Image (tube, grey):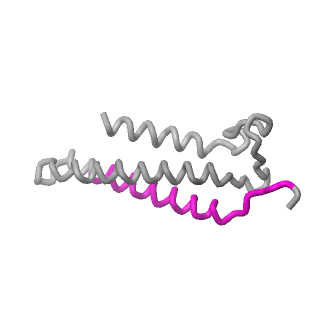
Amino acid sequence: MRLLSLILLLLTFLGLTNRPIRAAQKPEAETGQKISPKSGAMSDQDIQAMRQDVARMKALVQQMQTNLAFVDTSQSPLKHQFQLEIEMWQTMIVEMDRRLDQMSREPVHKPGF
């Protein structure tokens, strides 16, 4: 069940990150935030929210690793599949961290500056 939830979370995240930034954001009139169309810079609040999501994903991967310790000690196909899934999530988290670091270094477009 947890694995299914994690997969759904990943698919949701991938679906959101593959959309153009304008389609994923509410219109400026609703949010009061401006996003630079050229740079696609995110607000500090958005970046902080994504950092919290990544921290939660790291905790879930840690739980997966802990649960893996209780799986049969022999190298079964099921255990190997769990190991591969943990590696996949770790790779995804590293990529998300890298993107967040890059986005946090980009200046946020502010009118009049």
Q: Decide which of 92, 110 is in the foreground and name it.
A: 110
Task: Report whether 103 appears left or right of 85.
Answer: right
* Residue in front for this viewpoint, 14 or 28: 28
**Residue farthest bottom in this picture:** 105
Left or right, residue 20 beside residue 84? right
- 18 to 106, vertically: above or below: above
Q: In front here: 45 or 57?
A: 45
The quarter holding residue 20 reads: top right
Q: With respect to residue 32, does 104 lie above or below?
A: below
- On whether residue 3 falls in the magenta region, the answer is no
Label tally? 0
Percent position of residue 7, x then y: 40, 40
Image quadrant containing the C terminus? bottom right
Name of the residue lying farthest toward the left? 73
Where is residue 33 shown, x and y percent of the image?
75, 45
Q: Residue at x 57, y 53 (%)?
A: 48
At x 45%, y 56%, the residue is 93
Residue at (71% x, 55% y) in the render? 41
Residue 1, image x, y percentages: 30, 33
Q: Is residue 77 left or right of residue 38?
A: left
The segment highlighted magenta reads 83-111
Query: In the figure, is residue 94 to the left or right of 22?
Result: left
Residue ID at (11%, 53%): 74
User: Can you give x and y, in whole percent of width and height, for residue 11 in the image?
Assistant: 48, 39
Of helix, strand and loop, which mostly describes the magenta segment? Answer: helix
Q: Is residue 91 magenta?
A: yes
